[in-house]
Image: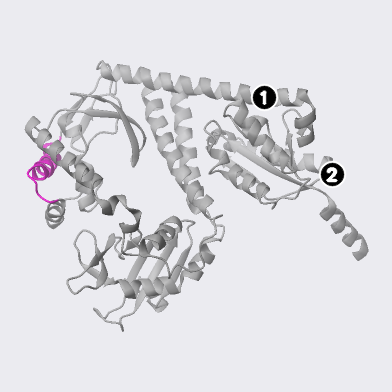
Amino acid sequence: MASETTIDQQHQQQRPLALSYLRFSSAAQVKDIKKTDQINRAKQWAIDNGYQFSETSFSDLGVSAYKGDNSTIGDLGRFLKAVEDDLIPRGSVLVIEALDRLSRENQWRGQMLLGNILSNGVDVVTLNDNQKYTFEDLQQDMGVAIRIILAFNLAHAESQQKSRRVTAGWQRNLEQVKTGKRKRSSAIPNWLKLVGTMDDGHFEVNEEKAAVTRELFSRFADGETVWSIAKNFRDREITTPRGKTFAGGNIYRLVKSKAPFGILEIGKGTKNDRTIFDQIDDYFPRILDEDTQRRVKLRLDGIAKRREGNRIVNDPKRKTNGILTGVIRTVKGERCVCRKGTDGSWAYVESTTRRWLASRNVIESRFLDGWGEIALAHGTDASPEVDGAEAALMAAQDAVEYAERKGSGRLVIAAQADVEEAEGALKEARRGQALATQEVPEDIAGMEPWEANQWVRMIIEQVTVIRGDKKRGPERKTMLVVTLKNGLKVRLGDTELVFAT
């Protein structure tokens, strides 16, 4: 009996490998258990054709094949890299539903992507028509090459048509907004209230909230520093429109808005990466006069001009003197920066209050001592951010489908905006996941601070500093909680402080 088991195991090891790749463009496709169905069909194909099915499958949800994102930051990109690095044995086969699951770019890019897989000794099988593609077929059979080109051409044309329909819908909505027939979105400044519906409603001003915005813009226009404005608002317990504590960065972001001057800016993208391509004057009730608007613009233009000529901003080697710049936080979540004191020593201080946190040497020595542990955690497969982003995208796509069933153009536009933001978040999460495949240096202690900081920012989301009871001095206990972009946490330094959090 043992002999038979050994023979069976040897037979399995000799069989070529079959892997599956799935790409879903909507949440409904996953909810309809098509994912399980496709995996089962791929597995059955492998059994029927003498292949050993790999339980490791590759899948992309909401990652565009039309723009080629699935082959760069998606799971397909991971598969392609594994193929090119000979991590997938020659003679293996990739099982997919149809060729358009690989690419919806133009036919030449699609053919190049398929050719890249085939030329590395991995065949491709499509379940929708039960076709198997090999590199020899691509080279020798003109009929196969034409069939591939036609399949990718059709997929690209369908995606183009869908893109045009969505663009036309956005444009129709925009024209109605410009002519005053409807409101653009229910997402409005916090000092306004929409009374009525999107089709026949109007805005009313909340004077209490508008007064805060007027004060903020006026003080900025008068030349007061953003730090002074933020501190004054904190002392008065005034929060941002989102209910957060004011900081200098909040002031800069808020004064760039044109909404207090009655202007609606039209753009696309996420809130942190948005491209403005149009604006509508007199859309909102104006709460600030033209003189304030002029002075705010002059000051913002001056700040932008100074930043353009600032060598510290434009020269990467001079950007930071701290390895943890951009990721270091206090236990309360306050951002910290690396500053040089009057005595010539460097320390990390809170960015808004300039309150001292710890000397640079104390913090960075503990961090550098634990870099090996951080690098090890970075290489561990953990993707809660991707899972969460996928769930958010699924919910947003469900909202679009609900709006389409209801026939509400307003709901469709609002839901589509949520989908765009969720897609952006998922793209960023997948980019972080893709970085996990990149090897990080074993040691960054010998690097310049700005150079080490590039690696730190690449793989680390946040470093929280926890201090012991003593106010200052080398005897004071310090622990760093390092949260990586893959969701794992590493604790460094005096880890007995874990119970102090």
Question: Which amino acid does the dot numbered 2 rest on?
Answer: Gly
Find out whether residue 101 is within the magenta segment: no
Q: Helix, strand, or loop for circle 1?
A: helix
Q: Nearer the viewer, residue 438 or 184?
A: 438
Number of other residues with Cα within 10 Å of mark 1, as a class: few under 14, some 14 to 19, many 20 or more: some
Q: Position of residue 338 (x, y in %)?
A: 27, 64
Q: Position of residue 366 (x, y in %)?
A: 39, 74
Q: Are marks 1 and 2 in contact (CB under 8 Å)?
A: no
**Horizontal side of residue 481 vs 436, given as left or right:** left
> Mark 1 or mark 2, which has the lower sequence index?
2
Q: To which residue does mark 2 refer?
A: 50
Q: Which one is nearer the viewer's eye here, 438 or 497?
A: 438
Which contiguous range is marked in magenta?
206-225
Say what amino acid the circle numbered 1 marks. Ile
Residue 133 visible from this viewpoint: yes
**Alpha-carbon distance for marks 1 and 2?**
29 Å
Examine the rendering and report whether any part of residue 131 can be seen: no
The secondary element bearing badge 2 is classed as loop
**Residue under numbered circle 1:** 149
- Which quarter of the figure is the N terminus placed in? bottom right
